[in-house]
Image (cartoon, grey):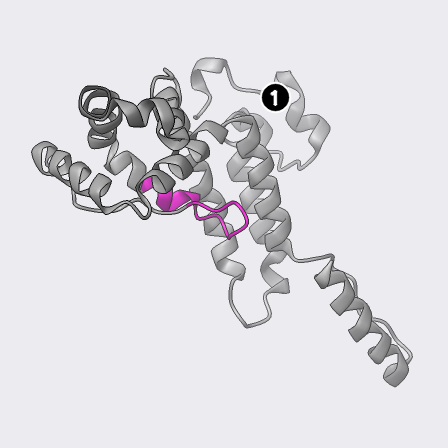
């Protein structure tokens, strides 16, 4: 791990100079939060990420396909915007990609579920990206997953955006992490539990502290 190696090297130099060690505050908090988001996405929202990736790669490098899609955009009154690439190794780009996918939703459904079968059926049978998109669009929960991934990504990018700066920010780390965790917990935990300001895994996972299913934010 690069962060750990840098800490070790600097720490060794500090000990040589002052006979003291650096205060260990852990590794990069953005990496940890980013990885936590990806683990959550694997549980709910993976289909949304898969759909965004497949749509992007289907059009990427194929102007003729995009020209056909633009015609549908015009007919449906959809903005002439292109898809945004999602890459899991980058800092949470899913928020912008989900926003664009939802914006283009009507045109995408018409293109892949009507235009392709009627006018370009060979693509639906041979192109793996096209086949994957068509399969995912037919899932009854796919649009809900997109909205869930979007709202979740917004919470995490609000946190990571604070720390993608050059000035020292360790003094706000605890408060920002607390806010992040409490915000996530507020989606499914009772207000009475949240007011106790308890950050404990066992308490959070205890069903007695959870909201009724109909009140859960998603």
Span colored in magenta:
86-99
Disc 1 target residue = 209
Q: Residue at x 62, y 37 (%)?
A: 197
Residue 195 in sight in this render: no
Secondary structure state at the residue bearing disc 1: helix
Q: Residue at x 45, y 41 (%)?
A: 153
Q: Is residue 83 left or right of residue 195?
A: left
Q: Is residue 203 left or right of residue 65?
A: right
Q: Is residue 62 magenta?
A: no
- Where, by quadrant of the figure, is residue 29 drawn? bottom right
- Give the camera-side residue of 166 and 175: 166
Residue 161 in sight in this render: yes
Give percent across and percent down for residue 156. Answer: 50, 45
Give percent across and percent down for residue 141. Answer: 39, 18
Furthest residue in direction left, as rendered? 75
Q: Residues within 10 Å of mark 1 (few under 14, many from 20)?
A: some
Give percent across and percent down for residue 104. Answer: 24, 36
Q: Is residue 78 left or right of residue 5?
A: left
- Give the camera-side residue of 78 and 29: 78
Furthest residue in direction bottom, as rendered? 17
- Give the camera-side residue of 74 and 211: 74
Give percent across and percent down for residue 93. Answer: 44, 48
- Where, by quadrant of the figure, is residue 115 drawn? top left
Q: Is residue 82 above or below residue 186?
A: below
- Where, by quadrant of the figure, is residue 36 drawn? top right
- Give the camera-side residue of 8 and 114: 114
The quadrant in which the N terminus is found is bottom right
Q: Is residue 181 above or below residue 187?
A: below
Q: Is residue 37 above or below residue 25?
A: above
Q: Residue at x 56, y 52 (%)?
A: 176
């Amino acid at each position: 791990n690069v962060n750990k190696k840098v800490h070790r090297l600097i720490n060794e130099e500090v000990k040589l100079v002052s006979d003291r060690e650096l205060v260990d505050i852990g590794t990069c908090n953005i990496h940890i939060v980013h990885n936590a988001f990806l683990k959550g996405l694997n549980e709910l929202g993976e289909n949304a990420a898969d759909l965004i990736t497949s749509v992007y790669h289907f059009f990427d490098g194929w102007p003729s396909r995009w020209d056909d899609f633009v015609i549908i955009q015009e007919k449906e009154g959809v903005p002439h915007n292109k898809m945004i690439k999602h890459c899991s190794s980058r800092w949470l780009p899913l928020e912008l990609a989900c926003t664009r996918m939802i914006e283009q939703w009507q045109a995408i459904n018409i293109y892949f579920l009507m235009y392709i079968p009627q006018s370009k059926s060979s693509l639906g049978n041979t192109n793996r990206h096209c086949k994957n998109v068509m399969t995912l669009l037919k899932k009854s929960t796919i649009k809900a997953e997109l909205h869930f991934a979007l709202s979740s990504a917004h919470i995490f990018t609000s946190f990571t955006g604070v720390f993608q700066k050059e000035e020292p920010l360790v003094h706000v780390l605890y408060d920002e992490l607390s806010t992040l965790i409490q915000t996530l917990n507020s989606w499914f935990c009772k207000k009475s539990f949240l007011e106790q300001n308890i950050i404990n895994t066992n308490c959070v996972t205890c069903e007695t502290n959870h909201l009724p299913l109909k009140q859960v934010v998603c």
